[in-house]
Each structure stands twice: as C-alpha cells, then as structure tokens.
Image (spheres, rainbow, N blue to C red):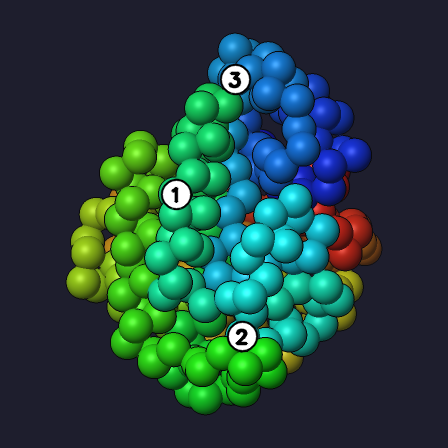
Amino acid sequence: MSYRCCFEENYVKTTLNRSKPRDLAVIDTDGIDPAIISAAVERRVFIYGYINAAALENGRTYYGSLKHLRLARYEGWSGEYWIDPTAQEWKRHIVDLAKTIKETGAIGAYLDNTDLYGYIRDREIKKQYGRDLPTASSVYKALSDIVLELHKIGLIVMPNGGDIFTKKFITEHPGIIATINQEGVFYENFKKQSPSETAYRKNWCEWAKKHISGKVRIIDYCKKPAEIAAVRAYCLAHGWDCYISKHTDLRGD
C-alpha cells in the first residue's frame, strides 16, 4: 500500500492513475472532474479529500463570500488567511464541502490547519482585518464541532499536525480520530529539522500511535537518496506510513 498526497490540480489525474488498489491518495478535490475520482474509487483506491479547517486561500471560488471572516495573514503562504472558525457560515461551508467530498466516493478528510487553536491559545496571532479574535475555548469548540460533523457524515478524519488541538480532542473524544498526519518530522523545505523539533514531532506521533486505532502518517520534504532511505527506514521500523515529496508543493510523486 502506497501513500500519496497531491494538492496541485494539474497533477491529481496522474496521481490517481498511478495509484493501485488499496493505495491511499490524499487529494484536493476542488476543480477535479468527479469522473476521474470515481474511476480511481472503482479501482479500489482509497481517497481522502483536502479540507482547510481554519484558513482560506484567495484562489478558491468561495473566497469572495467568506473573506469577511479573515483574522490575519497566514505567514509563509501568500494569499492565504486565518479564518474565524467559530462563525456559523464557516461551519456550514465546511459541512457542505465535506458532503461534496463524500459524494465523490472519498472515504476520508485530510483536515488542515487545526493548529489555529494553539496559535490563538498562545496569543501568536494578532487581528489584522478588524474582526475580534475568538477565544481559544471557542476555537477549540468550533474545530471539535467540525471534526464531529465530518465523522457523522461518514468521513474518516485525519488531522494534519495541529497536535495541541488534536491531542486534546483525542483525549476528550476517544475513538473519533483514527489516524493523523504530521508534516516535516525530519525535513522541511529540503532542510533538516533541528534535533529538538524532530524530537518534538516524533514524540507527538508516538503519543498519537498509542491513542488511535489507525495509522500515523508523515509527509517529509527531501530529495537526496540517502535522506529518503533513512526516512523510509525509520517509518517502516515504527509502523508509520510516509509520503516523501521532492517538491515544495505536493504533486503525488
């Protein structure tokens, strides 16, 4: 079973075509012909759809109708903004998106940016668009409601990172989150992580492994054969799935 992630529209079809039965393909379904996804599902490819839990990109068709919910710029990602997940219209948007993803035949949701809870809790975000920042407790509840609703819809929820939120949620709602993903355990943007950061992310993944019923998965960004081999060997020894990207964007290679 291979694990691939592709969030670039131009590469989704190739990624799905390369995927074999029982492979897991995490894709951004936005703008993708449903027939392409259905064909992969019929070949028994497991598909998770991308859902951005707490941020909004200006390239999305729904950006104009939701941009008034922006809290602050998302540092490091041009054109992306932290959003207020406590707003009812944001929750409705997420639920509608999840239902659309489920209708494609996807079995899971790759839930990104739940780390907003930790940033709000630790006061690492300042408002920039006139909207008062929500409280940490309200953000936690809003994100929890989203996870519970996605579970109710019938999607397997796989948070990406966001360990502060996810650990708290798993503790309070055991059995709902069955799998997690963590980026950059060993390498980030083709640079080796600091020993302290790698240790922190390893510890989070090992904690999760003990508290979930499914897989721990990681995405790492490296190119050198020796680096790739070392990451894969570590994941194999620890029972993790890994996807290694040779591009800063995720192309499913």
Cα–Cα span, label 2 and label 3: 37 Å
* Residue at the disc numbered 1: 95
* Residue at the disc numbered 2: 71
**Secondary-structure class at tag 1:** helix
Expressed as whole percent of the image width and height from the top left, the position of residue 197 reads: 56, 77
**Secondary-structure class at tag 3:** helix
Residue located at (39% from left, 63% from top): 87
Say whether residue 223 is left or right of residue 178. right
- State the mark number for residue 250: none
Expressed as whole percent of the image width and height from the top left, the position of residue 243 reads: 62, 45
**Secondary-structure class at tag 2:** strand
Cα–Cα span, label 1 and label 2: 21 Å
Expressed as whole percent of the image width and height from the top left, the position of residue 120 reads: 43, 80
Instruction: Tell us which disc is closer to us: 2 or 3.
Output: 2
Question: Can the viewer see residue 188?
Answer: yes
Tell me which corner region of the image, top left, top right, bottom left or bottom right, holds residue 14. Answer: top right
* Residue at the disc numbered 3: 41
